[in-house]
Image: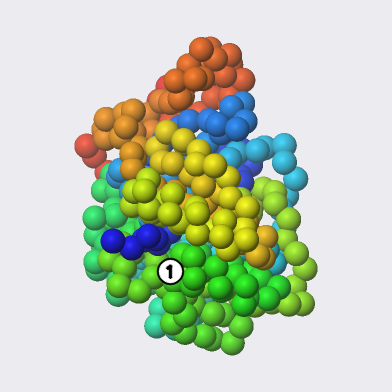
Amino acid sequence: MPDILGIHHVTAISGHPQRNVNFYNSLLGLRLVKLTVNFDDPTTYHLYFGDELGRPGTILTFFPWSDAPKGHRGTGQVVTTSFLIPKNSMDYWKNRLKNNDIIVKGPFNRFDEQVLTVYDSDGLELELVAHSSAEDRDLNVWNDGGVPFEYAVRGFYSVTLSEEGFERTAGILEEELGFSLTGQEKSRFRYKIKNSEAGASIVDVLCLPYTPSGYIGIGTVHHVAFRTPTDEKQKVLRNSIIKAGLNATPIIDRTYFHSVYFREPGGILFEIATDPPGFTTDQKPSELGTRLMLPEWLESERNNLEKILPKLSLPYPSTQSGVRKNNE
């Protein structure tokens, strides 16, 4: 069993939470699988979007920090998060996004894929990547997302790291996380988990020595998490990361997975997250994303937090296409 299976989740910073929900749920057709709070800042939501169950490899999460400054993409950051779509769906998505006044660029060809660049309501750079591997990931679709099944997002395809130099970062990807270099196009170096059947196993590293450093804020990625199958594997990985001379946090219980954080040599925050226990540990599959969930140690603060947190119109599960809204 490999130690790293691919990408677990990506966490970014957004502005207003309702605008965020509208974009990822109503437009991209992802399911809001968990509405909770930032465990390190409970007065802020933590929104999780993914497939029907929030399977690892499909989860894009957000800290809605409305008062935060606008971020800037640059070196030392995850600059692009890429979703996988079926090969025949590019025209559908281009028209759907443009009809909703979303900025898009492309499509263009890269390696053996076709790519459409998209910017969400806060300027976060995304890609929709049309590739034949989508045929193997039909399970990673929320059928109630309002997007026809044959065009729907199949989870993550890759993430792109922007680095001033790439060798030390490449060393961590290869020696500690199990990635292998599989291709290069100009300054883009592609790394992949070989023989991984989990999908979402690609990391691209852009070597951009003359690009200014990025800084965190609205519209940028906070961290990327890589998935490991068990707590035991996570412990082994943590020890290996420490032996490589990097600072790693203790194992932290995030309720839905267990986490270890460290910064790779280029400054990007990496996380190692376990697949279990998953998002159904405190809700039935049919109830995911329908109400605010808090860890036990915050339940005593529920009344106060519900007064502080912005009111949201939430998507509810439905047996019909599309979503239903609550009456708040």
| Viewer-side residue, 26 vs 206 | 206
**Residue at the spot 44% in from the left edge and 41% down from the top edge:** 258
Is residue 114 something one can see in this rendering? no
Q: Amino acid at mark 1?
A: Gly
- Relative to 138, 241 lies left or right: right
**Front in this rendered view, residue 158 or 2:** 2
Q: Is residue 1 above or below residue 187?
A: above
Q: 166 or 318, which is in the foreground?
A: 166
Q: Colour scheme in the image? A: rainbow
Judged from the image, the secondary structure of the residue bearing numbered disc 1 is: loop
Q: How many numbered marks are there?
A: 1
| Residue drawn at point x = 47 percent, y = 36 percent | 254
Q: Is residue 65 above or below residue 287?
A: below
The residue furthest left is: 319
Q: Quadrant of the N terminus?
A: bottom left
- Disc 1: CA contacts within 10 A as few (<14), some (14-19) or many (>=20): some
Whole-percent x, y for residue 23 in the image: 49, 47
Seen at 49% across and 77% down, the residue is 190
Q: Position of residue 192 (x, y in %)?
A: 42, 73
The residue positioned 55% from the left and 31% from the top of the image is 39
Instruction: Give the x, y percent position of residue 323.
Output: 34, 38
- Up-down relation of residue 207 to residue 103 (above or below): below
Spot occupied by residue 131 in the image (x, y as percentages of width and height): 35, 74
- Residue pointed to by mark 1: 178
**Which of these two is toward me, 67 or 104?**
67
**13 horizontally vs 114: left or right:** right
